[in-house]
Amino acid sequence: MGGEVHSVWTSNVEEQRFAQLAPPAGTDRVLREMFSAWSAQTVDHATSRLLSWSGAGSEVVGVEQTPMRHEYRFLEHRRIPHGWVVYAISSTGRFFTVSALWDYERQVPVISRHPREITKGSFLQDCLERGWGARLIELGFAQAPA
């Protein structure tokens, strides 16, 4: 029983530590600024073409925050940090998302180098489900109800 009590106590102390290191309010604003300087290159496996991605020329429709979560597999426990998903439209008209995870040590979000291109229909549906219809109207991708 002593090992179980120590394990629970250690877990609670770790949770408190990670809660203290959590992203502060307003981090999504910082993430948007960082996104404007972000760029990446990927390969389109269907055509073997090199694709260039840039936050500077893209329009951000919205940023969704994801809370820290725990993943358990067999006897292994992983802590998935706080994160964000940026929904954007590139200057060339591609619809994509890019994720960012909170770096607890440096206290900054780290943007992935692997954007995910999605279809226009899926993108618009995802944005509407998240309540970003006004932003889509502002960008000319949807019309205001009559």
Image (spheres, rainbow, N blue to C red):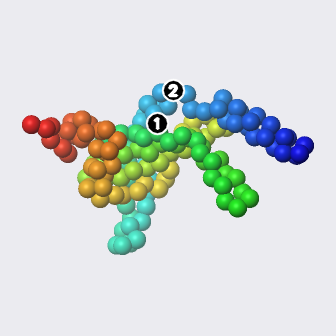
The three-letter amino acid code for the residue at tag 1 is Leu
Q: Residues within 10 Å of mark 2 (few under 14, many from 20)?
A: few
Residue 75 against residue 80 in the figure, above or below: below
The answer to whether 77 appears left or right of 118 in the picture is right
- Residue found at the far left of this picture: 146
Name the residue rendered at 30%, 38% in the picture: 132
Q: Name the residue under label 2.
A: 25
Numbered label attached to residue 31:
1
The N terminus sits in image quarter: top right
Residue 38, image x, y percentages: 44, 45
Name the residue rendered at 40%, 71% in the picture: 45
The three-letter amino acid code for the residue at tag 2 is Ala
Please name whichever residue, 78 or 8, is drawn nearer the observer in this view of the structure. Answer: 8
As measured in the structure, the alpha-carbon distance from the residue carrying label 2 to the one carrying label 1 is 12 Å
Name the residue rendered at 47%, 48% in the picture: 99
Task: Write down the quadrant of residue 133 in the picture.
Answer: top left
Residue 11, image x, y percentages: 75, 40
Name the residue rendered at 58%, 42% in the picture: 68
Task: Write down the quadrant of residue 119 in the picture.
Answer: bottom left
Please name whichever residue, 94 or 24, is drawn nearer the observer in this view of the structure. Answer: 24
- Residue 92 visible, this angle: no
The C terminus sits in image quarter: top left
SS class, disc 1:
helix
Residue 49, image x, y percentages: 36, 68
- Residue 123 visible, this angle: yes
